[in-house]
């Protein structure tokens, strides 16, 4: 049987035994948000959780033990608020939630790392503020910021143009959870511009950006093979973030 590192699927005694290795807590962060007619509302959470799973294996190769905590599903998702199923928290609530989860987890774990794939600007502001506030309280916490240039350069043009449910995210879903991709809808969707250009012009929602179906990019260009390549880059970002954070705490 494969080693279980997902705490929500473990018993308390199994977690207790695993804590002897002084693990880092990996906490996936997602959103409940529209991702086009071909991807589920939990897309960001599914991708972040798979990134954490693969990242844990990569960290283990370097001698760093980790456990994956339950994901934080709810956060700011204002861009998709016009679409059925999207749930968006106020920024203040999201910040406190993220801060307090880190503070609580850090009481037991060597360090805490948020594994984030939801890139809405206000959400990123909340996450950064939550981490900063937790650090001020003495918490050993970091987050994988894939918007940094060093990581963005590894993730391709679709990502940098503001993919949302396009080739970038759809490829990741095809690699992580192909059964959740609505293939008939995916192959019928016309390509659209990325979200970044519209945001630079002031768009603050998917509808304002011209995304009447809540996706941006080209879902038909996605593939599971590309998803595997993208996960390699995401895992590199995660593992280096954790190791660099632990190094600064040495």
Image (tube, grey):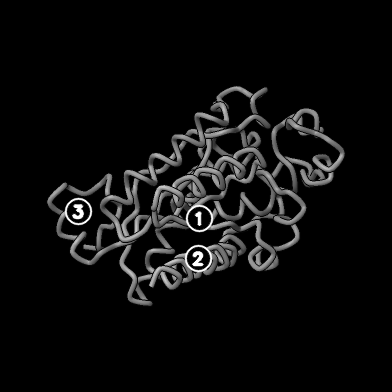
Image coordinates for residue 17, horizontal then vertical, percent: 15, 59
Give the number of marks: 3
Task: Determine whether the residue tagged by mark 2 lies in a helix, strand or loop.
Answer: helix
**Real-space Cα separation, disc 3 to disc 2, in angstroms:** 24 Å
Q: Residues within 10 Å of mark 2 (few under 14, many from 20)?
A: some
Using residue 53 as the reference point, say whether residue 241 is left or right of it: right
Closer to the eye: label 3 or 2: 2
Q: Foreground residue, 46 or 236?
A: 236
Question: Residue at coordinates 33% horizontally, 76% vertically from top-left?
Answer: 63
State the residue position of label 1.
Answer: 143
Q: Foreground residue, 219 or 69?
A: 69
Marks 2 and 1, the one that precedes in the sequence: 1
**Real-space Cα separation, disc 2 to disc 1, in angstroms:** 7 Å
Using residue 107 as the reference point, say whether residue 228 is left or right of it: right
Quarter holding the N terminus is: bottom left
User: Are discs 2 and 1 less than 8 Å apart at CB?
Assistant: yes
**Real-space Cα separation, disc 3 to disc 1, in angstroms:** 23 Å
Image coordinates for residue 137, horizontal then vertical, percent: 41, 47
Question: Residue at coordinates 44% horizontally, 41% vertically from top-left?
Answer: 99
State the residue position of label 3.
Answer: 15
């Amino acid at each position: 049987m494969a080693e279980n590192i997902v705490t929500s699927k473990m018993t308390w005694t199994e977690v207790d035994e695993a804590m002897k290795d002084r693990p880092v807590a990996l906490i996936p962060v997602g959103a409940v948000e529209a991702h086009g007619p071909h991807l589920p509302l939990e897309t960001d959470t599914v991708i972040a959780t798979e990134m954490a799973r693969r990242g844990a294996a990569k960290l283990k190769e370097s001698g760093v033990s980790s456990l994956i905590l339950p994901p934080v599903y709810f956060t700011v998702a204002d861009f998709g608020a016009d679409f059925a199923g999207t749930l968006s928290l106020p920024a203040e609530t999201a910040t406190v939630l993220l801060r307090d989860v880190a503070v609580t987890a850090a009481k037991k774990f060597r360090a805490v790392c948020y594994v984030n794939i939801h890139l809405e600007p206000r959400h990123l502001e909340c996450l950064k503020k939550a981490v900063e506030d937790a650090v001020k309280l003495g918490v050993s916490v970091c987050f994988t910021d894939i918007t940094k240039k060093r990581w963005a350069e590894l993730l391709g043009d679709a990502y940098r143009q503001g993919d949302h449910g396009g080739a970038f995210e759809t490829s990741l879903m095809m690699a992580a959870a192909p059964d959740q991709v609505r293939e008939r809808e995916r192959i019928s969707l016309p390509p659209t511009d990325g979200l970044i250009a519209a945001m630079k012009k002031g768009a603050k929602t998917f509808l304002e950006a011209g995304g009447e179906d809540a996706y941006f990019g080209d879902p038909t260009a996605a593939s599971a093979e590309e998803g595997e390549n993208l996960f390699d880059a995401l895992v590199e970002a995660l593992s280096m973030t954790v190791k660099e954070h632990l190094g600064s705490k040495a």
